[in-house]
């Protein structure tokens, strides 16, 4: 019996590694959403500094809009700049108490800040939002679905 359990465990680890995942234990630490959000702000400001743009200031209203959108996507299992109610990012930002909105970046499935920032910086449209020197404020929202998949949102304001 013990040999069968070991064999099944080895097979599970091998399968996880073969599809690009990593083997983790039930006690693996999960980085809190607020930590990931802060890391995204720092990485965004680092990229902007290299491009000659000023550091973005965190806006509570933009953060509220970003968190709301990430949470809604994670809870309801969709991925779109358009909210389930048909809202645009500019409408969500305005409803959160901020105007004018300059841009929005969303992503899902990246397990860490390095991955999501690499993805955004390799995408011309997302990179343009990050390096838009007219943006002066930022809000970041991170939420996980029931499977642990992370939904990321950046809101940029002028």
Image (spheres, helix red, strand yellow):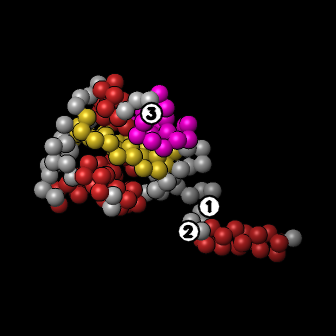
Name the residue located 55 percent from the left edge and 68 percent from the top edge: 20
Distance of label 3 from label 2 (alpha carbons): 31 Å
Instruction: Residue 15: tell me if it is visible.
Output: yes
Q: Disc 2 marks which residue? A: 20
Distance of label 1 from label 3 (alpha carbons): 35 Å
Q: Secondary structure at mark 3?
A: loop
Residue 83's label in the rendered image is 3
Name the residue located 56 percent from the left edge and 65 percent from the top edge: 21
Q: Which of pointers 2 and 1 indicates the residue nearer the eye? A: 2
Instruction: Residue 44: tell me if it is visible.
Output: no
Residue 25's label in the rendered image is 1
Return the x and y of residue 44 as percentages of the image width and height. Answer: 27, 52
Q: Secondary structure at mark 1?
A: loop
* Magenta region: 67-85
Q: Earlier in the sequence, mark 2 or mark 1?
A: 2
Return the x and y of residue 38 as percentages of the image width and height. Answer: 33, 47
Q: Earlier in the sequence, mark 3 or mark 2?
A: 2
Residue 100's label in the rendered image is none
Q: Earlier in the sequence, mark 1 or mark 3?
A: 1
Mark 3 Cα shell of 10 Å, populated few (<14), some (14-19), many (≥20): some
Return the x and y of residue 151 as percentages of the image width and height. Answer: 46, 46
Please identify the quarter of the rendering in which residue 52 is found: bottom left
Q: Does the magenta-highlighted stretch encompass residue 89?
A: no
Distance of label 2 from label 1 (alpha carbons): 16 Å
Q: Is residue 132 left or right of residue 7?
A: left
Quadrant, the N terminus: bottom right
Quadrant, the C terminus: top left
- How many numbered discs, if any? 3
Mark 1 Cα shell of 10 Å, populated few (<14), some (14-19), many (≥20): few
State yes or no: discs 2 and 1 in contact (Cβ < 8 Å): no
Q: Is residue 125 left or right of residue 12?
A: left
């Amino acid at each position: 019996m013990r040999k069968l359990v070991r064999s099944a465990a080895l097979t599970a680890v091998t399968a996880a590694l073969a599809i690009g995942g990593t083997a983790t234990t039930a006690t693996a630490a999960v980085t809190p959403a607020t930590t990931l959000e802060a890391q995204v702000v720092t990485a965004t400001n680092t990229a902007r500094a290299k491009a000659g743009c000023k550091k973005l200031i965190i806006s509570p209203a933009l953060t509220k809009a970003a968190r709301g959108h990430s949470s809604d996507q994670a809870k309801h299992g969709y991925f779109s700049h358009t909210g389930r109610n048909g809202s645009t990012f500019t409408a969500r930002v305005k409803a959160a108490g901020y105007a004018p909105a300059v841009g929005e970046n969303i992503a899902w499935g990246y397990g860490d800040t390095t991955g999501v920032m690499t993805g955004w910086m390799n995408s011309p449209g997302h990179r343009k939002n990050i390096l838009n020197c007219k943006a002066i404020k930022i809000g970041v929202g991170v939420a996980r679905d029931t499977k642990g998949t992370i939904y990321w949102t950046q809101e940029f304001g002028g």
